Image (cartoon, rainbow, N blue to C red):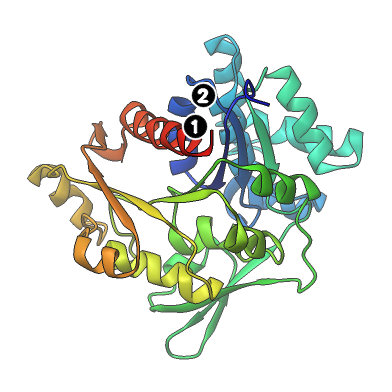
Amino acid sequence: MKNRQPRIVIIGGGTGLPVLLRGLKQYPVDITAIVTVADDGGSSGRLRNDLHIPPPGDIRNVLAALSDVEPLIEEMFQHRFKTSNELSGHSLGNLILAAMTSITGNFVHAIQEMSKVLNVRGKVLPAANQSVVLHAEMEDGTVVSGESKIPYSGKKIKKVFLSPKNIKPLPETISAIRKADLIIIGPGSLYTSILPNLLVPKLGHEVCRAKAKTVYICNLMTQAGETFNYTASDHVKAIYDHMSCAFMNTILVNSEAIPDDIQERYSEEMSKPVIFDTERLQELGLEVIPGEIVNEKDGVIRHDTKVVAEMLYSLLMDEMKKRN
């Protein structure tokens, strides 16, 4: 079918993924977002424990980013209660997803129904239809369990792994990866947002053997407790070590200097700009595409959603031309 929209699959979680999706949804593309279900902190963690459902927080943020509703509706969905009782800290969207899971008896159906209500452009799929627990083995051999606890262990991560052993991906995620014209990994925390998706058995295997070009959007800043002092190639190597296959073709790198005052603010959190070691990345077989991809707002660094979306769309168009 020549007239179909090109298909993009984005795999990630955390705050980085929604930022990117807001830009990409402006283009004529068919988006599938595969989102981590390893979160166990905050409102998501409480609902996960109380109701035995997968954590809704990352899914909620992605639904909001892809929604096409009045700003007030989106604001309501994202509203977080600041009361002194049990509601405190919960966001309305998390509660609605929990209620919908209870009504439909299925987390994936709940997401599908919410997607209709919010007029979501694209598909939002959890990496698995169940809660998973993320564990990290540290360099000293100790194991820390729980996504929210891993960055605070004060130790260097050797590898992360999931339990239970028999996690199954959704057939829809496998199908989306197989049909994709472009696969995007990231942005997101390396060990707690990106790898928990890729470590789902079969899902990672499909990404390894996918025909589509795979683009990695590396984080702009290192993260204390996860990627302290990591260069861009360290991020790539960590993913490859966990996956035992080298599957990424392209990496977007930031060519823009980050202002000193912002760097100072981040250094208080033991965070600094990721060094994009181009030569090493090329040695790993990656095509390196530089761009001014930083957006600074209120002292916080994020990817520039418009610039990155434009770069990705142009990559996608090049891919589609090659195929036709």
Going 81% across and 53% down the picture, which residue do you hit?
A: 52
Q: Position of residue 275 (x, y in %)?
A: 20, 60
Q: Which residue is drawn at the image coordinates 51% and 24% (left, top)?
A: 25
User: Residue 25: which numbered mark, if any?
Assistant: 2
Element at label 2: loop
- Callout 1 secondary element: helix
Residue 189 badge: none
Q: Residues within 10 Å of mark 1 (few under 14, many from 20)?
A: many
Q: Give percent across and percent down for residue 324.
A: 54, 33
Q: CA distance from mark 2 to mark 1?
A: 6 Å
Residue 177 x, y percent position in the rendering: 65, 48
Q: How many marks?
A: 2
Q: Is residue 177 left or right of residue 315?
A: right
Work out whether 138 lies above or below 285: below
Label 1 sits on residue: 21
Identity of the amino acid at label 1?
A: Leu
Q: Quadrant of residue 67?
A: top right
Labels 2 and 1 touching (C-beta < 8 A): yes
Quadrant, the N terminus: top right
Q: Name the foreground residue: 204 vs 86.
A: 204
